[in-house]
Every structure is written in structure tokens, then in C-alpha cells.
Amino acid sequence: MLRNVIHASLIGSALFFGTALAADPVFSFTTIDHPGATLTEAQGISPGGYIGGLYADASGVKHGFVLRHGVFTTVDYPGAAYTDVRATNPAGDIVGNYRLPGENPGYAIHGFVLKRDGTFIPLAYPGYAYMIAKSILPDGSVLGCVHNAGYVVMVGFVWSRGVYTGLDGSLDGLNVPQSMNNGATPDLGQIAGLFTDMTLHKGRAYVIQNGSFTPFDYPGASSTAAWDINPPGAIVGNYQDATGAHGFLLENGVFTSVQFPGAILTVVLGISPGGAIVGWYRDATGTHGFLAIPMPGHGQ
């Protein structure tokens, strides 16, 4: 089910990369509910506007989905007890995660790629027990993070043409602890993600541009996480402050808070090349996915 509302987003502005500006994009919000689901979450959006996510059925089992032209297609990893879809690319490839029956739901998760020909490719990073795959680029490169069995270590990775590189110091010298690569421009020139700053004792967002690591925070936030970046360089993610959890858009040095109207919390996870944003929100009726499109004359 799709339900549409129009709302002016809340605003936050700050000094970022030397720029202090304020703007007021207006978004048209559309609620996304999988038919018959007890919850729905939108996780990513492709350049063509296809939306990936997950839903829970009446028995509580979670399945992945792709929403194309208003039609939901369920995605279940073979034999899995849990599946989600995080993103799709223009070629029709899908990236997501699964958990097998009997595995600990609090820890165990594994990545996969579903090729457009229907072939599932399980992903595994040598030396790590678990993986969260977050995004897939037009050339098939996958980004995400891997964990050891106790989740004490989290390392961001890029899987490109069958080769893994990461942020654990042994691979590229960045030595960023508790990191997760979440989105990138098609040429991998910019990578956006999240990490734990051990000095400040808080979660922070980052951008890696041509090998240079730059952390950043939403103004006044106790924690910030970047979840996606589009080809023009607009970044979306989440932040936490005294009022709760909110999404954000960072574009041309301007932060804009994104809050679904009437929601208890809003999570923003993906952005298309044209600036369409997807995520999920929670209100008195439950958890729902959403699509937010900038209105003409505002934002991108």
C-alpha cells in the first residue's frame, strides 16, 4: 500500500567543510506498506527508482522485497530464516543479508548478491564470522561491514570484482575502528559510512574521498551515521539528539533534518541520483517504509 503526504522538513545547519548555509527543502512523503505485513522497512533505492527492503509476515518471519513500478517481489535466500534486501543496481542485481535457521538472531547475519539471472552468490570475508552487506554499485561492487563472532570487531569493506578491501589497517592503512562502509559514488571516489570514535566515545559519520578520511557530525547530535551517498555527493543518514532519532540530508554543505510527519522516529537509509530518499518510520500504528521526493523548486 502506498500513502502520500506532503510535509516541510525540519532544518539544521552548521559549519561543514567550511560552509555554513541554511535551506528548506520540501518533501512529498509516500508511505510504503507490503500487503499483509506487520512491519515494512525501505532500505535502499536504485537509480531507476526500484526500492529494496524487508517486511514481516503474519507469523513474524522477515523477507526481503523489491518494489518495482508499484509491484512487490519477495526475495528469500534459499533455506534462510531471515532475509532482507538493502539495495539494487541498474543491472538488476540485488544485495542483501540472510540468517539460517538455528543461528543466533542477535548476532548471525550473512551477505549475498542475487544476480538478475536468479543466481544467489553468498558473500564471506576471510577471517570474519558475519557480514552486513549494505549497497551495490552499477559495476557490482558491494559495500558493508564484517564482524567477528562476538561482534567486538566491526570492519568496513568494499568487495569489487571478487577482491575485498577494508578499513582495518592491514588493507589500506586507515585504521578506523568499528567502521561500516554504507554507500559510494559509482567510481568509488567517495565512500560514506559510520564508525565509533574511541576518543570522543560516540558514533560518527565519515566520508572517504580519494583515500582521505573525514569524520563529521550532525550539529548538536549525540551520534551520527551516514547510510548512503549519491553520484552528485549528497549524503543521507541518521542522527540522535535529545528529541530522539531523525534522518538527515547533507547536500552542498547544508544539513537538513528529515522527519516523517507524526513519526516517533525516522530512519533514512538510501538516496537516488535524483535525490529521492527512502527509509522507514515508526508511529502509533507500527513500522512503515517511506519514499520522500523533493518538491519542485526545493533541494535537487
Image (cartoon, rainbow, N blue to C red):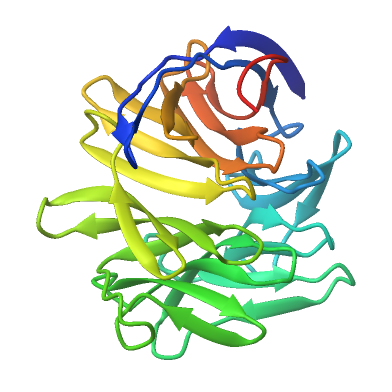
Looking at the image, residue 188 sits to the left or right of residue 75; the answer is: left
In this rendering, the answer to whether 276 lies above or below 110 is: above
The number of numbered badges drawn on the structure is: 0
Q: Quadrant of residue 70?
A: top right
Please provide percent x and percent y for residue 142.
Answer: 61, 69
Looking at the image, residue 71 sits to the left or right of residue 231; the answer is: right
In which quadrant of the rendered image does the N terminus lie? top right
Q: Can residue 94 be seen in this snapshot? A: yes
In which quadrant of the rendered image does the C terminus lie? top right
Please provide percent x and percent y for residue 27.
Answer: 62, 17
Q: Can residue 79 be seen in this snapshot? A: no
At x 45%, y 90%, the residue is 126
Looking at the image, residue 185 sits to the left or right of residue 103; the answer is: right
In this rendering, the answer to whether 238 lies above or below 3 is: below
Please provide percent x and percent y for residue 18.
Answer: 32, 38
In this rendering, the answer to whether 39 lies above or below 270 is: above
At x 31%, y 82%, the residue is 173
At x 25%, y 49%, the residue is 203
Q: Quadrant of residue 111?
A: bottom right
Q: Quadrant of residue 278?
A: top right
Residue projecting furthest to the left:
199
At x 47%, y 82%, the residue is 165
